[in-house]
Image (cartoon, grey):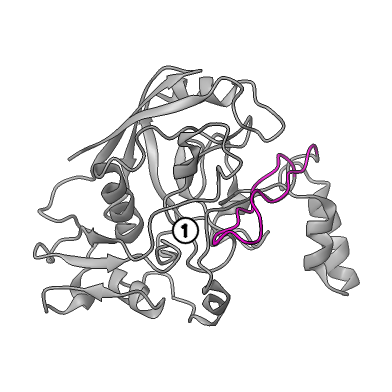
């Protein structure tokens, strides 16, 4: 799955077209460390083209983009309508071609920026072992990102994340996690997997206690939730994707610096990664993971395993 990526100069050339003024602008940005980090190594695609969801991944230089998997029918996803900021959760899902099953109530009433049953946002407790041991906790922005947070909560409660290893760690950038193939830390497919196609999760919003379910698509992906303007600040949890619409599934990354160019509402790069949570305790563990030694694929030399992800109401 594609995590933010700092790609090679070719990545820039592909996108700039023939406009000289645009080229000059990009060159100015390229040389501005406040916009893009300095070039270093560049990492290519993990996985073969035959895989359903090829993983475009990040390198620790220019604009970085996160990848997850993409369904074989995703080529048509570019035809999906763009959803305006602030759209209701059900509107986003329906317009993106996702199957929504509910209890018959008006689904346009689902998104009220409040939680099912009222109260504050839930948190997730992460316990890691191996190369780094410890715990950290994150608030999940269920009030502002109900689709993305509900998807994460469903996966965590099912034990999906337990036993998976961090498969990409880049200092002064981010930590990427959530690929089921990474249960084997040496798997060449790490970074290309996600939830099973057609699996469902409940949308956890007030007014729908009876249960509206969203079915993940044929690639196991969920709708893009480009609604709340939450920036990719240090400590935030953000969705990985392939760069194509509606291609996020289970993989996410934890920003360790402020990666503004990964914001879905920032036009510096094509990268669009919605934030759905933030670390509230245990940043020392995040920092320790960030500083671990890695191999040529940015995987920790001493594998770091997620023992358990627990959802705390």
Name the residue that disc number 1 marks: 248
Vertical side of 71 occupied by 3: above or below: above
Q: Residue at x 44, y 52 (%)?
A: 194
Observer-nearest residue: 143 or 127? 127
Q: Is residue 304 magenta?
A: no
Residue drawn at x 88%, y 75% is: 18
Q: Considering only vertical position in the picture, is 256 above or below 156? A: above
Q: Is residue 111 visible?
A: no
Quadrant into which the C terminus falls: top left
Q: Residue furthest right?
A: 20
Q: Quadrant of the rendered structure where residue 216 is?
A: bottom left
> Magenta stretch?
40-61
Which residue is drawn at the image coordinates 63% and 32% (left, top)? 172
Please provide percent x and percent y for residue 116. Answer: 14, 56
Left or right of 202? Residue 228 is right
Mark 1 is surrounded, within 10 Å at the Cα level, by few (under 14), some (14 to 19) or many (20 or more) other residues, namely many
Locate residue 297, reporting x and y percent. 68, 35
Q: Position of residue 236 (x, y in %)?
A: 45, 41
At mark 1, the secondary structure is loop
């Amino acid at each position: 799955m594609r995590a933010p990526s700092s790609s090679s100069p070719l990545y820039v050339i592909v996108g700039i077209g023939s406009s000289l003024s645009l080229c000059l602008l990009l060159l100015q940005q390229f040389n501005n460390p406040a916009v893009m980090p300095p070039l270093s190594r560049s990492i290519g695609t993990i996985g073969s083209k035959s895989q359903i969801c090829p993983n475009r991944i990040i390198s620790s230089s220019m604009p970085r983009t996160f990848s997850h998997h993409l369904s074989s029918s995703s080529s048509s996803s570019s035809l999906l309508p763009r959803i305006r900021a602030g759209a209701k959760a059900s509107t986003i899902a329906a317009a993106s071609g996702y199957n929504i099953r509910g209890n018959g109530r008006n689904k346009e009433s689902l998104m009220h920026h409040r939680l099912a049953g009222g109260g504050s946002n839930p948190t997730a407790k992460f316990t890691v072992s191996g190369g780094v041991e410890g715990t950290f906790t994150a608030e999940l922005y269920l009030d502002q990102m109900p689709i993305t947070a509900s998807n994460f909560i469903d996966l965590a409660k099912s034990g999906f994340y337990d036993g998976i290893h961090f498969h990409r760690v880049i200092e002064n950038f981010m930590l990427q996690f959530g690929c089921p193939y990474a249960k084997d830390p040496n798997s060449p497919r790490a970074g290309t997997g996600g939830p099973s196609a057609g699996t469902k999760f409940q949308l956890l919003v007030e007014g729908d206690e009876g249960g509206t379910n969203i079915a993940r698509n044929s690639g196991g992906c969920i709708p893009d939730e480009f609604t709340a303007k939450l920036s990719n600040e240090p400590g935030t949890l953000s969705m990985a994707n392939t760069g194509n619409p509606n291609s996020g599934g289970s993989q996410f990354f934890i920003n360790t610096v402020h990666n503004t160019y990964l914001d879905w509402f920032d036009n510096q790069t094509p990268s669009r990664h919605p934030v759905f949570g933030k670390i509230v305790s245990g940043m020392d563990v995040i920092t320790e993971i960030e500083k671990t030694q890695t191999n040529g694929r940015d995987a920790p030399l001493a594998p770091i395993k997620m023992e358990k992800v627990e959802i705390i109401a």
